[in-house]
Image (cartoon, coloured by chain):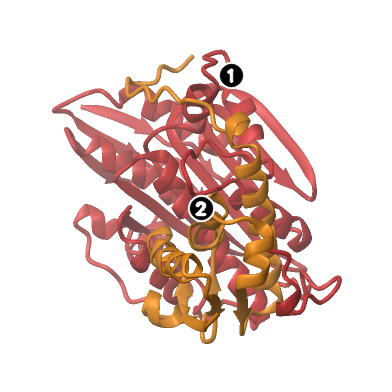
Amino acid sequence: MAEKIIHIYDIVGGSAAIATADGEKVFVELSNLLSNKDVAILDFEKINTLTTTFLHSAVGQLYNTFDSPFLQAHLKVLNMSQEDIAQLKFVVERAKQYFKDKESIEKPVKDVMDEEHDN
Amino acid sequence: MIEINFPSKIKSNIDGYLFIVKEYQKIRKIQSEEIHFNFSNTNWFDANMLAVIGAMADNLRNNNQVIIMNLQPTHEILFRKNHFLCHFDKPPLSDTYNSTVKYEKFETSDMPSFDEYIENDLLSKEDFPKTSTLLRKKIRESSIEIFDNAVSHGKCNNIFTCGQYYRGAKDMRLDFTIVDVGRTIRKNVRDYYGDQSIRGNEAIEWAVEKGNTTKTGNIPGGLGFSLIRQFLQKNEGKIQILSADGFWEEKKQEISSIKVDGFFQGTIVNLEFNLNDRSYYYLSSEIPESDIPF
């Protein structure tokens, strides 16, 4: 079981990890490593802005494919500040709940594009 | 010619928002008109409200001509310094003391420019107090979360922003307003539940609760508003949201939720940060990186 480091700074091209699209890039890299049963280490060195949007995309959606015991054994983080760890913890809790209850949470949405009236 | 006579005070409160959105609702479908925004009676102006006025003017200008007129000289100077009037063919003025927050219109696809704006135009001002790194980080992240929310849920093309610093006797505050003209929170929640009787304020109440999101698919959501609320409660700041016929505000942990007599085709979010806050937010107990409960 190999350990591989994913440098967030390099993937997002700077110190701000904020966009869903950048989170998606991290998710794809993570998914590839985890599918090979490697250990993935997310390195947040030099990241000074981090949003839940990014974390939902990068880490949250892993729970659609991988279960919690597997991720506990195969996912690690490095160089994360305490406030960012707290944020990641919220995202992880939310993702577990989201996918556990997906059937009841996610209802078919009728995406009505008609104009909204003021009543 | 259509004239809108703005009131003596344009403040970021329910009356201020309602005046603007009601006027907009009355005329938003007209075409090929000259529309005068007349500020001759206006002697008080919360500059962050320019985000709302700018959004309204921008949409009207798709099919009409909008003319800003009779601003008080001090307001005219301020609005040239913060570049609002540059959108109406007035040249900018140098912001010598670097004290204004620029009015901006962003493409929704341009989050990097928005982030740059937050860093350079909001957090790096002369007037910005020597505040904690953590507070700056939280202001930046909260603003980006609201921007992303507007992009994801508003399904709009542009986002309008403006800010204002307020010096009180004891503290200093920053109000930062973000506006999108697009799908309302009410419409998203109504469509999600298939219930067309949900009121605007009820939809906002739902949207700001932890774990609630109208997002579907493989990327979870539903934390943005709740974490901002949590932060602003500790910061002793304020959050106001107006969307469709709902107004919702949380200040000092007191919530007002009102179905308003008006309608806005979009969402206005105003965040007020207490810049004198020296709190250290999260660390009730340290979590080692190795102990994150995946």
Q: Which chain carries label 2?
A: B
Have a look at marks 1 and 2 and say if they share a chain: yes
Residue A22 seen: yes
Quarter of the figure with the N terminus of chain B = top left
Q: Position of residue B146 (x, y in %)?
A: 51, 52
Q: In which quadrant of the rendered view does residue A99 lie?
A: top right
- Residue at the spot 69% in from the left edge and 63% down from the top edge: A89
Q: What element carries label 1?
A: loop
Q: Where is residue B167 in the image (x, y as percent from the top left)?
A: 65, 67
Q: Label 1, label 2: how many angstroms apart (C-alpha)?
A: 23 Å
Residue B97 seen: no
Chain B's colour? red
The residue that disc 1 covers is B198
Query: Going by the image, does A88 lie left or right of B11?
Result: right
- Residue at the spot 39% in from the left edge and 48% down from the top edge: B151
Q: In which quadrant of the rendered view does residue B56 lie?
A: top left
Residue in front for this viewpoint, A77 or A3: A3
Residue in front for this viewpoint, A103 or B211: A103
Q: Position of residue B127 (x, y in %)?
A: 56, 77
Looking at the rendered structure, the kind of residue marked 2 is Ile
- Residue at the spot 41% in from the left edge and 39% down from the top edge: B154
Quarter of the figure with the C terminus of chain B = bottom right
Chain A's colour? orange
Residue B146, labelled with which disc? 2
Query: Going by the image, does B163 lie left or right of B1?
Result: right
Q: What element carries label 2?
A: helix
- Residue at the spot 48% in from the left edge and 58% down from the top edge: A57
Looking at the rendered structure, the kind of residue marked 1 is Ile
Residue A30, labelled with which disc? none
Q: In this view, does B127 lie above or below B179?
A: below
Q: Where is residue B179 in the image (x, y as percent from the top left)?
A: 43, 46
